[in-house]
Amino acid sequence: MTTEEEQVVTPWDVSGGADGKIDYQKLVKEFGCSEISEELISRIERCTKTKAHPFLRRGLFFAHRELDEIVTAYEKGEKFYLYTGRGPSSESLHLGHLVPFQFTKWLQDAFKVPLVIQLTDDEKFLWKDLQLEDCRRLARENAKDIVACGFNPETTFIFADASYMCPSFYVNMVKIAKCVTFNQAKGIFGFTGDSNIGQIGFPPVQAAPSFPDCFPHMFGMNKKSLKCLIPCAIDQDPYFRMTRDVSHRIGGYKPALVESRFFPALKGESGKMSASDPTSAIYVTDTAKEIKNKINKHAFSGGGATIEEQREHGANLDVDVPWKWLNFFLEDDEKLKEIGEKYGSGEMLTGEIKQILVDVLTPMVEEHQKRRALVTDEVLDLYFNPKKTPKVFLDLFREYEEKEFGKWEKKVAGDSGDDDDLCKALEEKMKLEGATENEEGCAIGAPKSEDWLRIRKERMQQDAPTEGSKSALKKAAKIKAAAEKKAAEKAAKAAARAAKEAAAA
Ligand code: TRP
């Protein structure tokens, strides 16, 4: 019996079906995610007042899970945070690696939300033939390229697993891990008896940052202080399918996802871009000359074999790599359309479209190199600093409580200005208002505008009670009791004083 070759898509393995191509519609069905509709894109444009990124307009980010819910909540004034990541296994990134980060940068700017970026040095150590120390070094090297994409240092936190792992992170991991059996993990990830147990135990590491309390310095200790949106390539879906399955049981929200197609390899869609074959991809470190050579010599062409054939039949855009890459990186919709028509009909030759691609990529890569050169260790530390933050929220939600913060900042300005004091001052402020760190909507510095709280409360009432809200109630009760005790003591003292004064008189 001959079986048709099945496509395989896991976080570590991507191979197409019999024709070498990925059937994305089949993938969406199999994984159970949804395609992004035109209507959803218009809603995003409307609520962010920003034109959709080309990756979104052109269907490169094409699938999602509950992105519509994030947008609905956002329309009502509720923010969220973004979470994405990279496994640092190679010295320099290729263009495909930049795609999710360029898109995330756009999301961050359009929605004005905070972002966390995970560098899974541990994952690469467990899967590749690399020393842990090398993976840790690569994490920092890769972070420079990520920072060069232009993320806002005040709202972006980058961390490497082997350095950041902290109690709140670990607590989330253990809770997640307990919800997933080995049989389920085998089904989701394809683990076998030969997988090392580090690999088998890894998925909770990538799942945990979907919950805001992994980042207490940014989002407070409440697992439901903010919802999470994850931009990623669709091969990462299994991690987050698992995460979504356990979210409710550990008392958190399901993370939402926005997922991309794969970036086509230089030598043809079914091929792989591999670090061991430098001609298989264009790297962010390539020179103008290398870019030109690689595209001219190695870019898979759907054009006719001879000029005559191309003139007569035109190019097959379905397999043409320069065309596909222009779809990613040429901003101008009109120009892109024109190129597609001319090249597809044979009016334009392969050499011409390759030249256009060179002209688009060269300045993009050179610009990236310039920006990366500016990322010193000092700059990098701004992003890796796990203490920096309440400022994230202060800045982020300024528009909601301009007045509140205006008053309050004046008070803080009297104190010395360093971060610890800012933290303390925020805690004081929250105490004054009777809020606790654990109370819904009161992650450090989170907005407390009437509207926002009301929306949140309504939603809380719909949700089943969770660990988080129960402990919040307990804590609130404790604080109330403490306050009553204090008031009683004060009253008793006042009464004693009054009695004394009366006796003296
Ligand atoms: N596993 C991913 C990789 O190998 C890295 C990663 C970690 C990630 N967390 C993520 C990717 C969240 C997307 C979203 O590249």
Image: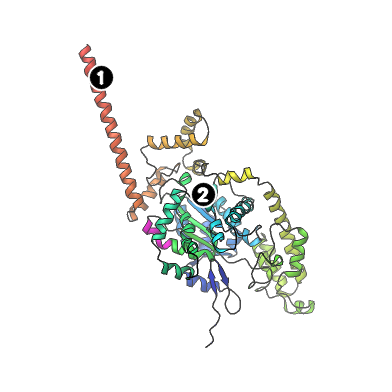
**Measured from the top left, where is residue 50 in percent x and y?**
57, 53
Task: Determine the CA span between mark 1 and mark 2.
Answer: 54 Å
Which residue is depicted at the point 47% across and 52% down? 74
Residue 184 lies in the magenta stretch: no
Foreground pick, 338 / 30: 30
Q: How crowded is mark 1: few (under 14 residues within 10 Å), some or many (20 or more)?
A: few
Tell me if I can see residue 176 in this picture.
yes
Assign ligand 1 to one image quadrant.
bottom right
Residue 247 lies in the magenta stretch: yes
Tell me if I can see residue 78 in this picture.
no
Residue 188 left/right relative to 319: left
Q: Which residue carries the number 1 mark? A: 497
Q: How crowded is mark 2: few (under 14 residues within 10 Å), some or many (20 or more)?
A: some
Query: Would you say the beta carbon of the disc 2 residue lies within 8 angstroms of ligand 1?
Result: no
Identified by mark 2, the residue type is Tyr
**Measured from the top left, where is residue 262 in percent x and y?**
59, 66
Per the rendered image, the range of residues in magenta is: 244-251
Confirm or deny contact between disc 1 and disc 2 (CB under 8 A).
no
Secondary structure type for disc 1: helix
Rendered image quadrant of residue 285: bottom right
How many numbered discs sit on the rendered protein?
2
Q: Which residue carries the number 2 mark? A: 164
Q: In the figure, 315 relative to 397: above or below?
A: below
Magenta segment main secondary structure: helix
Position of the C terminus, as image quadrant, is top left
Q: In the figure, 383 relative to 320: above or below?
A: above
Identified by mark 1, the residue type is Arg
Residue 462 left/right relative to 262: left
**Measured from the top left, where is residue 7 in percent x and y?**
55, 75
